[in-house]
Image (spheres, rainbow, N blue to C red):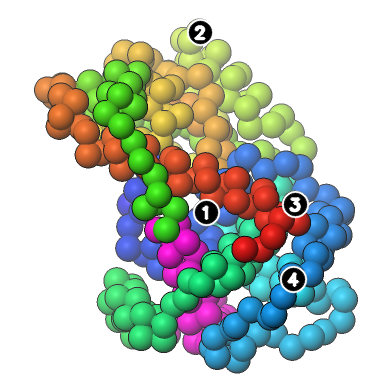
Amino acid sequence: MDGRSASISAKCGQAALLVSILLSLVAACDDAESSRDGGSGTVDGARSAGDAKPEGAALPVPSDERAAAPTAGTPDSVVATVHGVDIERADFEQTLQHAERALTMGGRLAEGERARLADKILQKMIQDELFVQHARAIGLSVSDEEVDSRMNTLLEASGGRTAYLQFLATTGLDEARMRRNLRRNMLVERLMDRIRAEVKLDEKQLRAHYESHPEIYASTGGLELAQILFRDRADGGADAESRARKARAEIRSGLSWKEAVDRYTDDQAGKAQAGSLGTLRPADLLPEFAGAIASLKEGEVSEPVHSPAGVHLLRVVRRQAGPARSFEEAREEIQRELIEAEVKKRMDALARRLAQGGDIR
């Protein structure tokens, strides 16, 4: 899946999985659009938000984390402290750099966008540290053997040891820190698994979701889509949404789609294909995109839609008819989606409680 369709589809390939687990980028990128404006106060606020001290005995830390932990430096080398655990500026800057590259396919974000992304990543790093500490405090752990097994799986998915070493060289990470990040992500996964096991849904909830989302379950056919992507500009010009609304008005007044793509899109890789995203299934779309195009006929263009990559105008090029799925056929997918939504809701609530100084347990 290429970078253009990755912002539309809810699914990730093996390469994205590797990056997300080892660098904890994907979640930060996926939520970047919803972050508040950043600024010079971001770092100080994060440090003060996390300086509560844990009660009771110190939490056990695996040996690979002790080995990978950075040594104490000057105050400027620390961007936040979470219950006595420092988040190093070097780690923060490295994560920000990789997230920016992922969002722009190697380019640079406008100053305001980068500030918002930096704020969101810092909050995500603080949240992850709180989750890790909470998981350990309630008795969850990940063994060395489990880390080894997951590492081997990821090595295979990334193309083997040679590709993995190239990845290390490109990112500037060492193997000890990679194992540390992997263990921490597995620990948060284990916490989510525990919450997931507690979620109970009844038939009424499942059926209500099915009936209220016909745009997702009404057909098994595909959608051929195209987009114009707008990003905020570093030159201080009109913001992305304003330019998207202007472009849509011009299209409705007679400007051809291809001319609009050539004139407006910030998706340079897709310009030659008139912004084509290929053919996607309705179930592959994020809810906000599915909703935006649900009632569009072939050739019609959506209102501006926000994503971490920017603002999109979506055009339905062609609808491929397919039989509607019955509730029974969609039941398993619906159950999975609702459980994951509830897990996210509970994790968000846990994050708020921990960030507000709640008992780490």
| Image mark for residue 52 | none
Mark 4, secondary structure of its residue: loop
Question: Can the viewer see residue 234 in this picture?
Answer: no
Say which label, 2 or 1, has the lower sequence index: 1
215 lies above or below 339: above
215 lies above or below 337: above
Q: Which residues are magenta?
A: 165-193
Q: Identity of the amino acid at label 4?
A: Glu
Which mark is in front, 4 or 2? 4
| Image mark for residue 253 | 2
Which mark is in front, 4 or 3? 4
Mark 1, secondary structure of its residue: helix
Mark 3, secondary structure of its residue: loop
Q: Which residue is mark 4?
A: 55
Q: Is residue 181 magenta?
A: yes
Question: Can the viewer see residue 336 in this picture?
Answer: yes
Structural distance between the alpha carbons of marks 2 and 1: 39 Å
Structural distance between the alpha carbons of marks 4 and 2: 65 Å
Q: Which residue is mark 1?
A: 27
Q: Main secondary structure of the magenta part?
A: helix
**Percent x, y for residue 244?**
58, 25
- Which residue appears at 55% of the width and 13% of the height? 249
- Which residue appears at 53% of the width and 24% of the height? 304
Q: Which residue is mark 3?
A: 356
**Percent x, y for residue 128?**
60, 62
